[in-house]
Image (tube, rainbow, N blue to C red):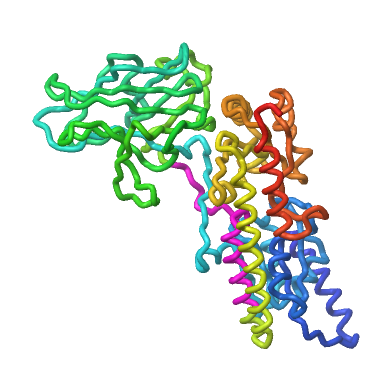
Amino acid sequence: MVRVRSLLAVLAVATLSACAAPVEQHHRTEVVATTPIVADLVRHVAGERAEVTALMPPGVDPHTYEPRLRAVRDIANADIAFTNGLLLEPHSLSTTIEEALPDNAPMVPLAEQVTSYGGKLKPLVENIALDTVWLGMRIVGKADSEVEIVTEKIDGPEDSKATAYITSTFGVPELVFDEEGDNYFLPADAHTHVSWSFSKPGMYHLTFAAKVKGELVARNTINVAVGVDAPNDVLDEGHVDIAVDLAHKNIMLRGDSPDGTNIAYDYDPATTTISVPNSTLQQIPAQYRFMGRPGDEVYLLPQAVLGKHVHGEVDPHVWHNMANVRAMVEAIRDKLNEVDPAGAQIYSSNAAAYIAEIDRVNNEVRMILDTIPKKNRHLVTTHDGYSYLGDAYGLSIAGFVSPNPSVEPSPRDIIALTRTLENLHVPAVFIEPQLALRANHLTVTADKLGIQVCRIYGDSLDDEVPTYLDFMKYNAHSLARCLGQSEGK
C-alpha cells in the first residue's frame, strides 16, 4: 500500500506540472488491460477505435507482477480498465487500479463475467489430496435386522494391502476391513462415510457379500484403479456409495448422476472403476499401523465427512477453455459499447468477427488434441493452472510440482509427482517458459525417469506466441506432439 501511495503522489506532481501545457484532444477511447492475454482480447474488439495498453509486459508472471509508475499514469488516463479478476492479479496491482482509475471509469474483471455469457467457472482446490471421489457404504431398503457386509476377497497387486476404516468423532479409526473375511454391520436404510487405503499402485478388485441373519442377499466385485488408468468408465469425483439394494438383491455403486446433479444414479460395478489418483499419496501416521509401517507411503481416499477443502475463490485461469474466452469477448464488447456508445457498431462488428475466429481455432485445437492416445492423455506441469484446459479438451490433470507457482513444493508434493510419473508412464511433462528456472524439481525428476520436457504457455504471451490464438494453437501442437508419442520416446 505504501508503494501504491508513493506512485500516486509522484503522478499527482507530474500532472500538476503539466497543467499549463496545451492538451491535445484525443478522440480514441483509452483502455488499460492487466495481462497481455486480456489486452489482446480487448484489442481485437476495440480495433482502431480505442488505444489499448497492457499494464504487464509479455512474458511476466501475472501472479507476482508489481506495477511501475508508467502503469499508474496509464491507469489514471484510462476511460475503462479490464482485468482478469478472480484474484489472478496481485493485490498491489488491483489496489493501484482501484485508486488511480478515474471515478467515472469502470473496472471490469472479465473472468467474473463469463457465467453471464455462457461460460463456466471452476473452484480452486486447496488440498489436491482431497479432490477425489468420496466412497462410502449404504444399505438401500428395509430389513428386520442389521445387514452384514463381508469382505470376501481382496485381489490387488503382489504384496499389496487394502484397508477401509471409519474415523470417529475423536479421530479414532474403526476398522471396516483390513483382510479377507472381515465383516461390518450397517442398519437397514443406513449410510456411513468410509476412508480407504491402498499400499501399492495398480488395480484392486474387492469382492463384498451382503447377508441378513446369515443368509446371502447379494455379492459383487468393486474395481479400484490406484495411481493407474482405469480400464473402463471411471468415477473420480462426487459422492459414491457401495450400496446394497435389499429389494433387488444386488450390490452396485450409487452416486451423483453423470450430468453433475445430485440426483442418485446407479453405476454397474462390472463396467465402472473407482479412481484413486496419485495425488492421494501420503505417509502412514503412527496411530494407523493397521495400514502398514508408519512412515511408509499409502494411497488414501478420505471419507466424505472430512469435506473437500475448497477455497472460497474460483480458479482464475479461465482462458484455457476457449468457450470462456468467447464469453469474455462478449463482455468486452458490451462494456466498450457502454463507455463509447458512438463506437458500438464497430465494437459489435469486431467482436462478431473475432468470435468466429475463436470458434474456428477452438475446433482446430480440439481436433489436434483428439489425436493424443487415451493412455497418454495425462498432463503434468509446474503448477495447478490447467484444470480448464483439461475439462475442455478431455485431458487428465495428473500432477504438478506445487499448487501455486509462488509456493515451494513440499516433500510430499515431490513424492506424489514422482509416483505419478512412474505409475502413469507419461511420455512428457510440461513447463512454462517464464517458470523454467523454478521448475528444477520437475526437470530433475523427469530426467531421472527418462521423460521428455516440453513447453506449454500458461499465463502470458511472448514473441513466439504474440496473440491468444497463437497461444492456444502452440499449446495444442506441443501437447499433441509430446503426448502423442510412444512411452519413453
Residue 449 at x, y percent in the picture: 69, 24
Residue 422 at x, y percent in the picture: 61, 24
Residue with the most extreme left position = 144
**Residue 259 horizontal side relative to residue 44, left or right:** left
Residue 127 at x, y percent in the picture: 52, 39
**Residue 247 horizontal side relative to residue 337, left or right:** left
Look at the image and tell me in which quarter the C terminus lies.
Answer: top right
**Residue 291 horizontal side relative to residue 329, left or right:** left
Which residue is pictured at 48% across the width and 20% down the height?
284
**Residue 152 horizontal side relative to residue 402, left or right:** left
Q: Is-magenta flag for residue 157?
A: no
In the displayed structure, 483 sits above or below 311; it is above
Q: Is-magenta flag for residue 312?
A: yes
Range drawn in magenta: 308-336
Query: Relative to the observer, which residue lies in front, 10 or 286?
Result: 286
Kindly indicate the quadrant of the structure image that contains residue 346. bottom right
Query: Relative to the observer, which residue lies in front, 307 or 95?
Result: 307
Residue 47 at x, y percent in the picture: 74, 75
